Amino acid sequence: MAKKPILDLLPRNMEFHNLSHVNLTDTQSRTLGLGLKFRPTLRPPTARAFDCQVQDFCRSVRLHYKYSNQPDDPDFNPKLYVKSGWNPPREDPNLEESLYSIRQDLLENFNNNKPRWRNNLSSEERSGLREIKENPTVRVLATDKNLGPALISTEWVEKETLKHLNDTKSYSKVTLDDWTFRRHKVIETREKLVQSYSHFLPPNSHKFLRSLDDNSQSLNPAKFYIIPKIHKSPIAGRPIAASHSFITRPISIFVDELVKPSISMPTVLRDSGELIQCLGGIKLPADCLLVTADVSSLYPNIDTKKAIIALDLLLREGKVAQTPLLVQFTRLVFDNNFLQSEFSRDIYHQTYGIAMGTPFAVTAANAFMYYHERDIIELYAQHLTLYKRFIDDIFVIWDGTREILLEFLSAMNAKDERIKLTYEISDSKIPFLDLLLFKDSASHTLQHSTFQKPLNKYLYIPFESFHPTSNKKAFIKGELMRYARNSSSFSSFTETRLLFWKRLRLRGYPAKFLLPIFREISYSNRCKWFSKSSKVSTQRRVVFKTTFNCSHVGIKRVILKHLPQLSSIVSYKSTNTLAQLSK
């Protein structure tokens, strides 16, 4: 009898949320417990496919050398760039010789070196997963708040999906001809606006705005689906409009990229790290109250007309020259959200609310809420030691009576009939985002540690997942840095770090792999991790794009051998995960 690998002998955390009527086998349960981000091992691609990757890299190198001496364009935005198919001329014989050698060595390594990995899913596990996938009565879905995978009945998913779409206050059914006409109208209106405001457009943005016009996928409405909110009682669905290839997506990205750096919203948080920095200078008033509030279903309840007015006012306050174009582009996106779900052939037009999934959604929601709350905040300013909001989550330090606080919250709820807050009030401690905030009576300050959600299964990427080692190290370092940042005391950091260690061990990570990473992250360096680095690299790196099943080829080593002066990086593209295999 073959010995089991040592990883299989360790206790393992292989939990998931079974919210269905189906009783899975132990093998099926264990497979779902790997988590939806788990990547099965892949065979290397064909030599021909790998050669295409090599030639694509060679093209990038030629482009790099052709334009390396040109100064950077300060108006260039890489997010608005559309890759061209242009191949630069082969002008430098020395460079071509190096590229030829790189190609020959890489192909030789590819053909001669055999991969060292083995299958991380057995045939029994793959068969069990296939059985779940082919079972029409259940679905495997990611959950809201990243609480782990859930097995849930198809009947519930269909009912919840159609409940949203059949809400006549927010959606109306349209014909295929209606949708086709509106799609053409979007393109026509966009072109008129581009022509009228061409002097405001950044370089290459016109090409970007047109980038989906001839894409066959853009002929379809956005895909509507839901994510189960299992932390709610009863369980509800968060509506999402997958707009990756939707016709208005380039416009939405364009608006978001130009609006975000141009407007100022002092009450809006970038992340929990920014809140921690705000708390550092606050002495708590005696008997102050801690308040958190959540806007119920914010996106589908936003009045887009009010959101556009809010955006217009913010842009004008910031004296943004492109304001008329950005406002009209925003209206074009909001007025043309068309959806279709897998459970119906009907096409729906969203008549109220913002589609969660369009790139501009978060910025627009922040602008809407900023103007929704602004005058009320001014009215109660004497009681607000701190008021901060992260999209639909609000945190308040209240210096006043509970009665006046309830009056303040009532005013927030009364301003718009569809914007309602649910709230929690405490005089000692309260969770907010990924923080647990609590009073320290000795220093009259608010201390903090990392809040751990009770329903979280902590299904980190398993050690045996077919991810690059660098990915695994990076996510562990990122979490440790977050724990250090979130902890106002060393003791709370060590407590959370120990839990993290145990959870990683239960996901198969060997101690010898974890120790160097844990030793690298020191609590004494936590101040460095509150903001993103402002350093901008002046050196352009050329990227070799491949998949991790080519990692045995020694790509970086070959490049350095023949072009040692070239700054390059090997980037592994995503491959199929358990999420894709279970759909």
Image: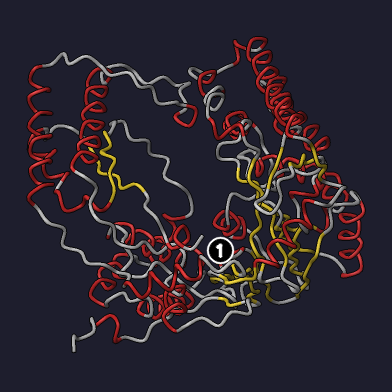
The percent coordinates of residue 545 (x first, y second) are 29, 40
In the rendered view, would you say 78 is above or below 122? Answer: above
Residue in the image at 59% along x and 49% along y: 270
Q: Which residue in the protein does label 1 denote?
A: 142
The correct choice, above or below, for 8 with respect to 179 in the image is below
Q: Is residue 366 left or right of residue 138?
A: right
Element type at marker 1?
loop
Task: Examine the image and state in which quarter residue 177 appears.
Answer: top right
The residue closer to the viewer here, 159 or 14, is 159
Q: Residue furthest bottom?
A: 1
Percent from the top left, x then y, of residue 116? 16, 62
Task: Examine the image and state in which quarter residue 46 appears.
Answer: top left
Give coordinates of residue 532: x percent, y percent.
45, 47
Foreground of the two, 252 or 220? 220
**Residue 286 to residue 208: above or below:** below
Left-right relation of 60 to 73: left
Number of numbered discs present?
1
Pick the quarter of the image with the N terminus: bottom left
Count neighbours of disc 1 (C-alpha within 10 A) and say few if under 14, some if 14 to 19, many if 20 or more. many
Residue beneath the point at 45% across and 73% down = 493
Question: In the figure, is residue 118 to the left or right of 394?
Answer: left
Task: Report the colour scheme.
Answer: secondary structure
Residue at the image point whose x is 65% and y is 53% from the top: 225
- Residue 494: horizontal and vertical position, in percent? 42, 77
Q: What amino acid is found at the position of numbered circle 1 in the picture? A: Ala
Pick whichever, 549 or 260, lies toward us.
549
